[in-house]
Image (spheres, helix red, strand yellow):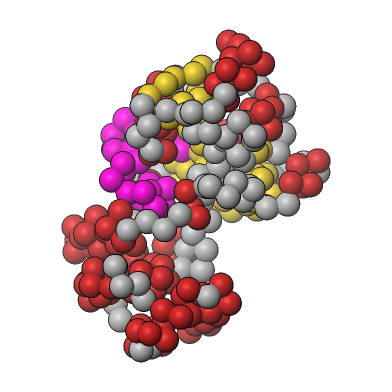
Amino acid sequence: MFSIIIPYYNKSAYIVRCIDSILNQTFPDYEVILVDDGSTDKGIELISKKYGDLIRVFRQDNQGVSAARNLGIEKAKYKFIAFLDADDAWHPQYLESVNWIITTEKEVKIVGSHYSRDVSFLENRHNIPNYFKFENYFKTAIRNTYFTSSSSVIEKSFFDESEGFNTNLKNGEDHDLWFRVLLSSGNSFYITNTLVYYSDEDSNQATQKKIDLEYTLVGQINSIYKDVIKSSQNKDFNKFISLYVYFNLFPYYFDSKNYTKAKYVLKENKFGFTLLKLVYMIPFRFGKRMVDSPKGLRLIRLYFKFTIKYIYY
């Protein structure tokens, strides 16, 4: 039923918790594929010794998480692909809950689940999962993009017909994939029970590294979806793309290295939102001080969230 793909790079401190959370699933029909992306720690030796043939391990030179996930997809045997990062973990009923939706609903393309940064919830017991179907994802996603790299299950047929993760992106590559899946045919669902532990324990994780704008989804999104935006009759999708840019671009806009490119990205936006544009009218020196300060960065994000939720949603 499920092919579970774990991209692995120097996560030996967390990998046992990750794999054990899979082996403790109440739903037994799955395979585990771990792709070693050129690790330099002793994690693979630990995995081989502790789990043996329970884990299918593939190795590649270091090419990044997207290439690792794509290799896992290529090797997958089952109808649905589940992703789990090596430092995250699942509630024991995660696959059982996803399977409930797959067997209850029709034409299931993607299933997401609520996550938490509090590991204690893993001990909670759930009955029938609480979930809903997205009727218009891109309108709903203005407030919350919902899907994450450890809480998403996708029908494998999507990858048979479309590209996997974009290896040119070093940030936002997961969002890009979710958006393309959600633009394709089929139904999407979201489980409101908390079933995934999303870890922020690793200080070296990629999400904490500053990536040049040209390698990020926000820097490429108008180009990637240019044809879709041009031909789309879905105004909510086009509006969502513009809001995504406003919300995610500002740390690059107030950065000397990325300013010119960020200014061009903002200009490409199809929709203009006056109240959001005000942030980008802040004098550069003052804006840079704000984005370089955790407190200032938080205030800008809160302003965007409030404005989007109560004005533009």
Front residue of 304/100: it is 304
Total marks shown come to 0
Reply yes or no: does residue 164 show up in magenta: yes
Relative image position of residue 180 (x, y in whole percent): 34, 49
Visible residue check, residue 205:
yes
Q: Front-most of 222 and 282?
A: 282
**Residue pictured at 81% horizontal, 41% vertical:** 123
Range of magenta residues: 154-178
Q: Is residue 310 above or below residue 133?
A: below
**54 left or right, relative to 118:** left
Q: What's the residue at 44%, 41% (across, down)? A: 109
Q: Nearer the viewer, residue 303 or 28?
A: 303
Which of the 4 quarters of the picture holds residue 68? top left
Q: Tell me the quarter of the picture where residue 107 sits.
A: top left
Looking at the image, residue 45 lies above or below residue 79: above
Look at 21% across and 59% down and name the residue there: 223
Residue drawn at x 64%, y 48% as measured from the top left:
201
- Does the magenta-highlighted stretch encompass residue 14? no
The foreground one among 108 and 49 is: 49
**Percent position (x, y) of residue 236?**
36, 68
Q: Residue furthest top?
A: 53
Residue 188 point in image, percent of width and height: 48, 48
Q: Where residue 100 appears, x then y in whole percent?
A: 63, 36
Can residue 67 be seen? no
